[in-house]
Amino acid sequence: MRAVFLALGLVFVGLGFVGAFLPVLPTTPFLILAAACFARSSQRLESWLLEHRRFGPVLREWRLRGAIPRKAKLMALAGTSFGFAWFMLGTSPGPAAAIPVGLLMLGGLAYVFSRPS
């Protein structure tokens, strides 16, 4: 199982890295998952993430209080809005597709904004 958690942690770090450059893919949730996987597989990689100068403080706050910084919440709102607009303009979905996608995105935002800052 340790190898599985290590592989998953590396995949999540990769997705987080890509998300740092793409507005529709989040970074922090993938790094939270990566840190959780590394906690079960590699103390060295877990420490690397938690001590990272940019992502470490956010990950440590999540572990301590389940907190999401206000800036990250606003970025989630902007990214989700951009993603939904892109979805609507790029695919012209009917209500049967647009409503569930919109509700899913609103649910995600509701969770993000329900966390302490």
Image (cartoon, grey):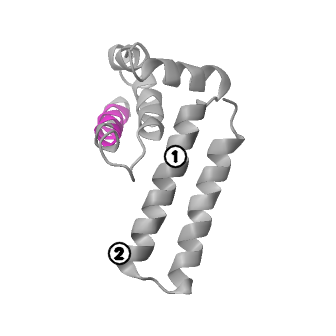
Q: Is residue 96 above or below residue 65?
A: below
Query: What is the quadrant of residue 48 in the picture?
Result: top left
The residue stretch that appears in magenta: 5-16
* Above or below: residue 39 compared with residue 73: above
- The verdict on residue 15 being magenta is yes
Percent of width and height locating residue 116: 70, 31
Q: How many marks?
A: 2
In percent of the image, x 45 and y 67: which residue is there? 85
How crowded pointer 1 is (Cα within 10 Å; few <14, some 14-19, many 20+) is rated as: many
- Give amino acid for label 1: Ala
Q: How far is the residue under mark 2 from the one under mark 1?
A: 20 Å
At x 44% / y 58%, what residue is drawn? 82
Q: Residue 104 in magenta?
A: no
Quadrant into which the C terminus falls? top right
Q: Name the residue carrying label 1.
A: 76
Dot 1 falls on a residue whose secondary structure is helix
User: Which residue shows up at 63% across the image and 19% down it?
Assistant: 64
Residue 67 versus residue 74: which sits nearer the camera? 74
Q: Does residue 74 appear to the left or right of 33 in the view shown?
A: right
Q: Residues within 10 Å of mark 2 (few under 14, many from 20)?
A: few
Quick check: 19 above or below 101?
Answer: above
Q: Toward the viewer: 30 or 26? A: 26
Relative to 114, say whether 44 is above or below: above
Please report contact status of discs 2 and 1: CB closer than 8 Å, yes or no: no
Q: Position of residue 12 (x, y in %)?
A: 35, 39
Q: Is residue 106 left or right of residue 16?
A: right
Q: Which residue is mark 2?
A: 90
Secondary structure mainly formed by the magenta segment: helix
Q: Nearer the viewer, residue 100 or 76?
A: 76
- Of labels 2 and 1, earlier in sequence is 1
Residue 65: mark in rendering: none
